């Protein structure tokens, strides 16, 4: 039975930031062993949504004029239940010296609208990211004060999980969502690749949205570090980490020997290539099948004297043994042909225009 090496897939991670929004980005990892895409994707998603640190308001001391959290103030449009809900939506990031918490008194003064920007003016160690959020509306000359506490936490913490103190009058605890990552969308596509044969693999795509307090790539890197630290902690003592190409599965030595011989076989072994093509490739340092598979399709197609028919024969040879070009592991080789056909059309169109111009010039001279 043939086995697939889990650690020899040469997976590549690519990050695509969203140009229109610095809070969104895309992470693509490919190729992966089949079904591994869903496994890794769910691990990263759950880690980003539950294990990253963030800041949120956890406590609010109501104004003296408000008897309970469902009460209201004269001259204020919203009741305090709505105001508390808006306070929960504020997102904070630490500035200057990192502190785990800050408690501050908010004095509401003149103005008809109180926003996150107004609240941020009272903070010393934190900055309000969504400072355009409207917390409440009121009449111009309505004054009152309340106290908030911003704390550092992880994931989502319900009020029942907090340490409460009932000795303070008007103290209300808020359920806090600390996680800086708001949404992670996963998608897994099937791709074909492989050296020995065509292998079904996965292409993992993660569309990540943050609250603006952390960069998308940084959130992904932190999640990776958390997963590595956890998996390392549960690994048995004395058990080495797998090396490149070591999946812990015993390989069939005869199968590996056949593969090595195939890669070292000279291209002259395949008579259908012809002496002209093998000599042409040999002049460019390509004499074996292994050396051919390490070259890019664009590079080979650009060799002077190598025509379309010769290129097609090389393509069929690679496909016969499940090999692929170095620069096109996940795409069809037809894209190279389409590119060359486009260039040929442009050349023919240029020649046609040149001929027509020459005819026009000759006709003018005759007249």
Image: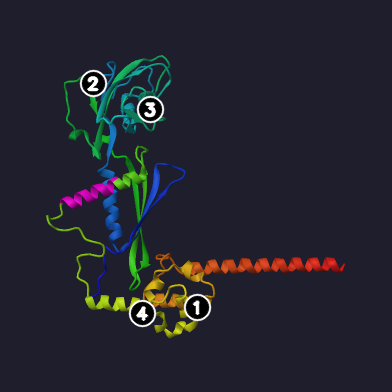
Mark 1 vs 4: CB contact within 8 A: no
Q: Residues within 10 Å of mark 4 (few under 14, many from 20)?
A: some
Q: Residues within 10 Å of mark 2 (few under 14, many from 20)?
A: some
Q: Is residue 186 left or right of residue 161?
A: right
Residue occupying image coordinates x 84% and y 67%: 365
Q: How far apart, in angstroms, are the residues tagged by discs 2 and 1?
A: 84 Å
Q: Is residue 353 magenta?
A: no
Dot 3 or dot 2, earlier in sequence: 3
Q: Residues within 10 Å of mark 1 (few under 14, many from 20)?
A: some
Residue occupying image coordinates x 33% and y 44%: 218
Q: Is residue 240 left or right of residue 296?
A: left
Disc 3 marks which residue? Answer: 116
Q: Residues within 10 Å of mark 3 (few under 14, many from 20)?
A: many
Q: How far apart, in angstroms, are the residues tagged by discs 1 and 4?
A: 19 Å
Which numbered disc, 3 or 2, marks the residue closer to the eye? 3
- Circle 3 SS class: helix
Q: If the image is split into quadrants, where does the N terminus sit? A: bottom left
Magenta: main secondary structure: helix
The stretch of residues the image draws in magenta is 222-233
Is residue 70 visible in this depiction of the protein?
yes
Q: Residue 37: which quarter of the image?
A: bottom left
User: What is the x, y in percent for residue 189?
Assistant: 37, 61
Disc 4 marks which residue? Answer: 265
User: What is the x, y in percent for residue 293?
Assistant: 39, 71
Dot 4 or dot 2, earlier in sequence: 2
Disc 2 marks which residue? Answer: 170
User: What is the x, y in percent for residue 48?
Assistant: 29, 46
Disc 1 marks which residue? Answer: 310
Q: How far apart, in angstroms, are the residues tagged by discs 4 and 3?
A: 70 Å
Q: How far apart, in angstroms, are the residues tagged by discs 4 and 2?
A: 83 Å
């Amino acid at each position: 039975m043939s086995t697939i090496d889990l650690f020899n897939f040469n997976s590549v991670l690519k990050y695509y930031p969203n140009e229109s929004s610095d809070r969104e980005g895309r992470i693509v990892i490919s190729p992966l062993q089949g079904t591994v895409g869903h496994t890794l994707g769910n691990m990263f998603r759950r880690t980003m949504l539950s294990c990253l640190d963030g800041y949120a308001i956890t406590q609010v001391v109501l104004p003296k004029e408000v008897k309970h959290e469902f009460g209201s103030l004269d001259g204020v449009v919203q009741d305090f239940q709505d105001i508390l809900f808006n306070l929960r939506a504020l997102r904070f990031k630490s500035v200057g010296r990192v502190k785990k918490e800050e408690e501050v008194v908010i004095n509401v003064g003149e103005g008809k609208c109180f926003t996150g920007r107004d609240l941020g003016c009272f903070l010393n160690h934190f900055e309000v990211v969504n400072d355009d959020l409207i917390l409440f509306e009121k009449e111009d000359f309505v004054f009152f004060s309340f106290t908030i506490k911003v704390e550092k936490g992880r994931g989502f913490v319900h009020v029942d999980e907090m340490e409460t103190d009932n000795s303070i009058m008007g103290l209300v605890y808020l359920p806090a969502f600390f996680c800086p990552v708001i949404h992670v969308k996963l998608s897994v596509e099937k791709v074909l690749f492989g050296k020995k044969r065509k292998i079904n693999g996965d292409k993992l795509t993660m569309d990540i949205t943050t609250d603006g307090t952390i960069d998308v790539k940084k959130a992904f890197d932190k999640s990776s570090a958390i997963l590595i630290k956890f998996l390392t902690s549960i690994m048995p003592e004395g058990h080495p980490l797998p090396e490149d190409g070591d999946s812990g599965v015993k390989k069939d030595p005869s199968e590996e020997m056949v593969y090595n011989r195939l890669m070292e076989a000279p291209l002259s072994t395949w008579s259908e290539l012809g002496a002209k093509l093998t000599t042409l490739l040999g002049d460019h340092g390509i004499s074996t099948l292994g050396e051919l598979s390490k070259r890019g399709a664009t590079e080979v197609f650009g060799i002077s004297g190598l025509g379309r028919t010769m290129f097609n024969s090389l393509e069929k040879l690679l496909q016969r043994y499940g090999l692929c070009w170095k620069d096109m592991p996940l795409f069809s080789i037809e894209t190279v042909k389409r590119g060359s056909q486009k260039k040929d059309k442009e050349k023919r169109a240029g020649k046609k225009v040149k001929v027509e111009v020459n005819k026009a010039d000759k006709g003018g001279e005759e007249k």
